Image (cartoon, rainbow, N blue to C red):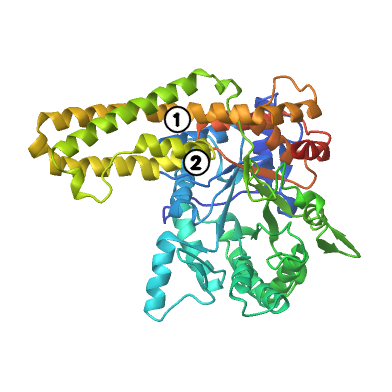
Amino acid sequence: MSDGGLLPGRATPEGCRAWAEARQRADPTLVAGTYRRLGRTQLTVSKLGFGGYRTDEHHPEHRLALNAALVEGCNLLDTSTNYMDGGSERLFGEVLRQGVAEGLIGRDQVVVVSKAGYIQGANLRRAEERKAADEPFPEVVEYAPGCWHCIHPHFLADQLDRSLARLGLESLDCLLLHNPEYFLADARQRGNQGVDAARDTFYQRIERAFMFCELMVREGRIGWYGVSSNTLPASSDDFGYVNLALLWEAAQSAAREVHGDGTAHHFGVVQLPYNLLETEALTRANTPVGDETVPVLEAARYYELGVLVNRPLNAMHANGSLLRLATPDPQAGDSDVQVALEEGLEEVAAAERAIDRLLAANDVASRFVDGDLFCLSRELRVALPQIQGVDHWHHIAGQAVLPNINKMVRFLHHNVAASAGPEWERVRDDYLQAVNRLLPVVEPALLARAVAANEPLRRRLAAVIGPVGEPLTLSQIALSFVTSTPGVTTVLNGMRRVRYVTDATACLGIEDLPDVHALAAATRE
């Protein structure tokens, strides 16, 4: 550790290469191409990276999952200043520093990527306080209540300080501007300038942000920088389209200003969405390169940029609906779980009716407009078809279901216990026990539904791939599709649970698939 308690150093070409070579020697199942060069950075990284979205230091399983990913050979970690309000960065920092202290990994062997730009949570409160004090961050895009955005150097400096402190690092390997196209989306929404004027302003702001990044490289606080944008693969006619060629020009201009040499820039990485349904990064010619217009993945190869892919398993249909490309457990489709779910819902409904009767007898329900205070069973029946998967359910259960139940039970305890006596305690305990039996049944039921819905797609894709040993899960096929696409360096997967790590890292032993175009076509059938 340095005197300030921060972990010194950063990823190096030599350290990352040594990590990859040691991993390949230790695990003969790893195929050629498991480790790749991250573009012009010369850093060697795993083709599967740990995505830190919705991870934080408060959940032990997130820590176990990150450690498992490192053990399995993933040496690229991607997070952001706004992921879990900084909690993701704190998790990464704690795990990395512990791994270095225990000799499990060297600081020079792991690539830490973070992003800045969003103003949410604590950042938003600080930004609002500064605005109220007439000291706002410059050039803030107030896109929506609860979601502002900024890439001005003053804001980026603030964010880099906080990011390094949370990570406990002296230097960040790569800093990405996080979805800077919010400026363009806001300009279109407000209608206060045309697309050409908005884009001129946008790339001026990008250039100033890149100048800040070049200064931070010179100071040793970051190694490389880049852009994470959802609209890099968009049509060039789209108002929010981000042009990779113009980003490259902005980096050259920034380097001339800072170093006096336009070729000395450190723009090295881009991040973009790409999956079995959203294949525009591979197929849509939208980026000018010389006399041609080529897809952004081809342009990234031309510029020798490392490419990180996000949203590999959350694919958006053209109609806006979501296709979750994951069935972590192909054996989860047991019809018994549907029976268990139905029984659990009915048990909760009976316990709710008992509470309603008790409240009515003690004249408590009449104090509320609607009565019928406990209706989880009914609401869950309505909500289940709309729940998009296990992660969505965990979010709903943790953020809404359990807090609301606990709040209501505590409230009623203060209002009913005195008049109802032991009877209240009995019906309350029966209800809570019924809920506790129901909630664990929801996850396997959702998994069974996902398996049933996605199994025909998995079989179609598996037929295109042909025999590869053990049958692949849909998520393994989807991840392998991305890593097999020319121009992609690393696919970022949200692996918040150890079983997700186990499922995803199986891809490290899968050879590149020969025909990604055929797989994409089979998905759309």
Mark drawn on residue 7 = none
Mark drawn on residue 442 = 1
Q: Secondary structure at mark 2?
A: helix
Q: Quadrant of residue 44?
A: top right
Q: Quadrant of residue 461?
A: top right
Instruction: For residue 58, say whether it is visible.
Output: no
Residue at the image point whose x is 37% and y is 79% from the top: 133
- Report the amino acid beneath label 2: His
Q: Is residue 403 above or below residue 32?
A: below
Horizontal arrangement in the rendering, residue 392 relative to residue 461 (left or right): left
Q: Is residue 521 above or below residue 251?
A: above
Q: Would you name the residue on which mark 2 appears?
A: 392
Q: Position of residue 247 (x, y in %)?
A: 72, 66
Mark 1 or mark 2: whose residue is earlier in sequence: 2
Q: Position of residue 487 (x, y in %)?
A: 78, 48
Q: Position of residue 30 (x, y in %)?
A: 70, 28
Residue at the image point whose x is 76% and y is 70% from the top: 249
Residue at the image point whose x is 48% and y is 75% from the top: 137
